[in-house]
Amino acid sequence: MNGALKYRFALAWALPLLVAAAAWHSPITAWVVMLAYQLSLALLERVPGLQHSPAATPQTAWHRWCVRLHVPLQAGLLGWCLFLAATQDFNALAVIALGIGVGGVTGSQGITFAHELGHSRARLDRALAWFLMASVCYAHFMVEHYRGHHPRAATFEDPASARRGESLWRFLPRTLGGGLLSAWRLEALQLRQLRRGWARSPLLWATVLQCLWLAIVMAWLGPLALLFWCVQSVYAVFLLEAINYIEHYGLQRRSLAGRPEAFGVMHAWNADHLLTNCTVANLQRHSDHHLHAWKPYAELEALPGPQLPTGYAGCLFLASLPPLWFLAMHRRLDQLPGAA
């Protein structure tokens, strides 16, 4: 039984396949399936027997290929729905519904798996991560997250760390603009340090290819296909930044001699809900991820840091309604050791 538990992460494959099948029926069905999936996870997170994941296990080839397989699944889903948007008699509202349905996959799983692959030391994995992030027009994440967010998480210098009392809707413009500017500054700094020109910048080339791809979609497949691609990208990025909002909300590293204290277990919110962890590669074990950024997802441990009121799926709905979010989170913040 314990050996079979490692295969639980294959549950993540169900979502792109379900949304692809639903899109065959209709764009609205794709959106409904995605929404039903999100609501079901949020409700199941309240079931006592599903609130804890199995203990960490050594990473195996299975775990590595489980994440890598999402790349062809996502590519197939995007290609299939792009074809539908370009060839079927859909109106703009139908294409928007289709884009949101697919964006739920590319955001909740595609970006999550890109994040995992980007932390790998294998060149293949990092290349796959660039591909997944470019597919949602957010390639600069590959610079900002690893060189910006990880060193600065839970500080005011990090645009991806939310401050106490800051709503999700106020956080979004700050993190979107701040993350983009930070990525280009960090890339310029690294090029100077390595004495390289911009022609050797993966960020520049990824950005050019993103723009070129949008132009090709518009010219070859038409405006509705372009609308689909943009909607799925926007919704995927929304999910990414909403999770960023949740992960460090209101937590702050102290300043010691003008520098932030070392990142500790108390500087990230955690959850260990089984089904959500199966679909997002243990991302909810977030303190351990920041403490050991190269640790593969199967080996992440559930540490006794700050605990969310529910898993990420439920917190997405709470965070969308600031009064409910503040009610749930400020009580927890006030109960943390060292709280004023």
Image (cartoon, helix red, strand yellow):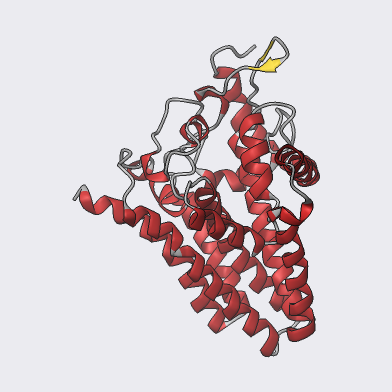
Pick whichever, 20 or 194, lies toward us. 194
Pick whichever, 169 or 36, lies toward us. 169
Name the residue at 39% across, 59% down.
66
On screen, residue 317 above or below 260: below
Give residue 195's position: percent from left, percent from top.
74, 42
* Total numbered badges shown on the rendered structure: 0
Name the residue at 68% across, 37% down.
148
Give residue 222's position: percent from left, percent from top.
77, 84
| Quadrant in the picture for the C terminus | top right
Give residue 228's position: percent from left, percent from top.
70, 73
For this view, does 11 lie left or right of residue 311? left
Name the residue at 50% across, 52% down.
117
Name the residue at 46% across, 72% down.
17
Pick whichever, 155 or 65, lies toward us. 65
Pick whichever, 262 or 16, lies toward us. 262
Give residue 204's position: percent from left, percent from top.
75, 56
